[in-house]
Image (cartoon, coloured by chain):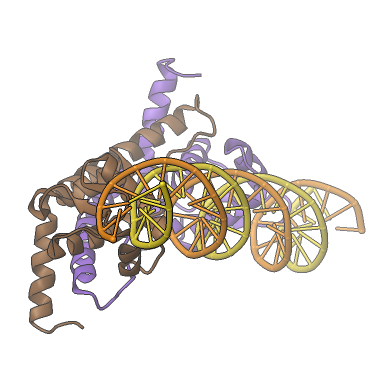
Chain colours: A purple, B brown, C orange, D yellow
Amino acid sequence: MRQDGRLARMIHVLVHMGLLGGRETSERIAQMLNTNPVVVRRTMASLRQYGIVESEGGRGGGWSLTRPLTEITILDVQRALQGETILDAPLSNDHPSCPVERAANAKLQRAFQSAEQTLEREFQKVALAEIGEIAMASAKAGKTG
Amino acid sequence: MRQDGRLARMIHVLVHMGLLGGRETSERIAQMLNTNPVVVRRTMASLRQYGIVESEGGRGGGWSLTRPLTEITILDVQRALQGETILDAPLSNDHPSCPVERAANAKLQRAFQSAEQTLEREFQKVALAEIGEIAMASAKAGKTG
DNA sequence: TATAGCGTAACAGATAGTGTTACAGTCTAT
DNA sequence: ATAGACTGTAACACTATCTGTTACGCTATA
């Protein structure tokens, strides 16, 4: 399946927002992501719909978290961006009444469901606060720029 | 990640080939898949490279399995089509030196590696012969057309 | 009321699998 | 030998999805 780069980018942004603590404009977020403000608004709108961030228009407006990083998991961000399903089993649909195709699809679907459960469990284990702590620790240790 | 429909389609074809037992032309396989012979050759070429099928040119030529369905797993087909990696963790690469991006990527990578291991295990558990048996049983039971 | 912000539509670009045509190479039957 | 039935492969169009960009409307604040 083709991966969706928005998950990693949004996690990146949310952690920065949590560490900085204030409100960020689409313009500044776009700079963090090497992209442009419209793309940011488009993606952040999904997070807002899911209740992770809120936006305010007008002068002094921008985006802010609705709750601390300790209460946002990777799974929350994933759900906000892509809904319930993380992995889509790539089934075939060439001859829907063919028993071979059906049997093959059933096996594939089961395998992908297992993997999806694993991913879901892993995503839920990680709160964004943990990512922030790791980042701050490694920055303090001088491992990166 | 975007799914690759070739896995399901190739499993479908290989099981049919195993059940029929003989050699199949790209033309006939294309009919099974509602597609055309060039697409079939393109995809079957990956399976040949991996040793799952072999092809012979010339009159009377076509594609045949190199071993029975009991000795081909879904994982074999997956590896032939996409190489070692099943799931690609969708990491971000906007500011490679940013500790937050690095920490987020590390967490995502670990989660996807777990899911990949699950998928790999599930794929390896299923030999194509098993799919053939299920299909024949359900066809005999009159569950499908 | 000017300005700084978001909201959103519209369109171009990039990428990956798929569909199709065309033609070269190869094997077999005659 | 040669015709015919195959695969091998290049070339190009089509599609879908995410991304990038421009443009313009709405809103809140100084």
Q: Nearer the viewer, residue A58 or A116?
A: A116
Q: Is residue B115 above or below residue A132?
A: below
Residue at horizontal 50 percent and vertical 27 percent from the top:
B96
Report the residue that reaches farthest toward the top: A142
Residue at horizontal 42 percent and vertical 26 percent from the top:
A136
Q: Nearer the viewer, residue A124 or B43?
A: B43
Q: Nearer the viewer, residue D26 or B45?
A: B45
How many discs appear? 0
Q: Position of residue B92 (x, y in %)?
A: 47, 38
Residue B44 in view (yes/no) = yes
Q: Nearer the viewer, residue A59 or A94?
A: A94
In this picture, residue B133 sits left or right of residue C11: left
In this picture, residue C22 sits left or right of residue B109: right
Q: Position of residue C12 (x, y in %)?
A: 72, 53
Residue A122 in view (yes/no) = no
In this picture, residue C14 sits left or right of residue C26: right
Q: Quadrant of the C terminus of chain B?
A: bottom left
Snapshot quadrant of residue B21: bottom left
Q: Position of residue A137 (x, y in %)?
A: 38, 23
Q: Is residue D6 above or below residue B103?
A: below
In this picture, residue C11 sits left or right of residue B131: right
Residue at horizontal 8 percent and vertical 66 percent from the top:
B133
Q: Position of residue D11 (x, y in %)?
A: 59, 47
